[in-house]
Structures are given as C-alpha cells and as structure tokens.
Amino acid sequence: MINEEKLLIELNDLGISVEKHMADADKNAEETLGFSYKNQLAMLKNVIRRIRKQPKIGGWIPCSERMPETGIPLLCQWHKRNELDTEVYFSILHVDDDGKWVADYGMPNGEVVAWMPLPEPYKEVTSNE
C-alpha cells in the first residue's frame, strides 16, 4: 500500500505541479527524447490516476463512497443498529457474493460505515536475508 497524500505532497515539493503542467500542455508541443510534452503529461496524469486508485495507508473509505471487491478481508468500522449503543466497533469483515458484510463468526449486528485494507502481515527479517 502507498500513502497517496504523502506521495502527492512530495511530488509537489519537488516542483511537479500537475495542474500547472496540464495548463501549459496545450501551449507547448516541445519534443523531449522523441516524446511530445503533451504525451509526457498525459502519461504523468495516468500515473497519478493509478496512484489515487491504490489502497491507502490509514485511509478509511466510506461505504457511501464505494464498496470493496468481494471476498477480501478488510478492517471495518460499524455501529450497532439500536439507539442505546453508541459505541464504535471494528472487525475484520469481507463482502460476500450477495453484497453482504460477513465475518468468520457471522454477520455484524449493525451497519458498516467505512473500511480500509489490512496491512501486510509482519515478516521477521533474519540476518541471512
């Protein structure tokens, strides 16, 4: 997973302002190493679009924004369905083929409001690696 916000901030800190370059793209048709400036900017825009689609570190995705693919275990935040319980719950759940949130122990007694990808499992590094 990547930290999209940090990456985009670093790119901007390096002076790579996509908006500025895209505005200038129509004005300039310079050739650099056989690629027109416009083609280079189109490739950069495509890379940034792909970055934004990647799972984010620490980035909660609201269910109202988009739902995940089926069968992938995710960290989910959910709320119980009654007015008395105001606690926020976290569980590892996945979406089944019917579009319902489920866990190994069954279905949560509430509404899933947001989800995020799980981190990579810990792997011990030995001195031989």
Image (tube, rainbow, N blue to C red):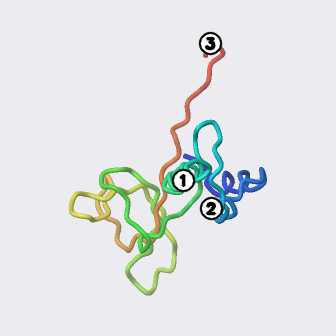
User: Which dot marks residue 53?
Assistant: none
- Dot 1 or dot 3: first in sequence order is 1
Viewer-proximal residue among 52 and 129: 52
In the rendered image, residue 107, in percent from the top left (x then y), is placed at 30, 64
Callout 2: few (<14), some (14-19), or many (20+) C-alpha neighbours within 10 Å? some
The amino acid on which the numbered mark 3 sits, given as a three-letter code, is Asn
Q: In this image, 11 relative to 117: left or right? A: right
Above or below, 101 against 123 in this view is: below
Q: In this image, 78 relative to 122: left or right? A: left
Q: Secondary structure at mark 3?
A: loop
Image quarter hosting the C terminus: top right
In the rendered image, residue 23, in percent from the top left (x then y), is placed at 65, 65
Closer to us: mark 2 or mark 3?
2
User: Which dot marks residue 42?
Assistant: 1
Q: Secondary structure at mark 2?
A: helix
Residues tagged 2 and 3 counted as in contact (Cβ below 8 A): no
In the rendered image, residue 127, in percent from the top left (x then y), is placed at 66, 15
Which residue is identified by label 3? 128
The amino acid on which the numbered mark 2 sits, given as a three-letter code, is Met
Alpha carbons under labels 1 and 3: distance apart: 43 Å
Q: In this image, 95 relative to 29: left or right? A: left
* Residue under the image location 67 percent in, 62 percent down: 24
Above or below, 85 against 9 in this view is: below
Of all residues, the one furthest to the left in this rendering is 98
Callout 1: few (<14), some (14-19), or many (20+) C-alpha neighbours within 10 Å? some
The amino acid on which the numbered mark 1 sits, given as a three-letter code, is Ala
Q: Secondary structure at mark 1?
A: helix
Which residue is identified by label 2? 22
* Residue under the image location 53 percent in, 63 percent down: 60
- Dot 2 or dot 3: first in sequence order is 2
Q: Is residue 62 visible?
A: yes
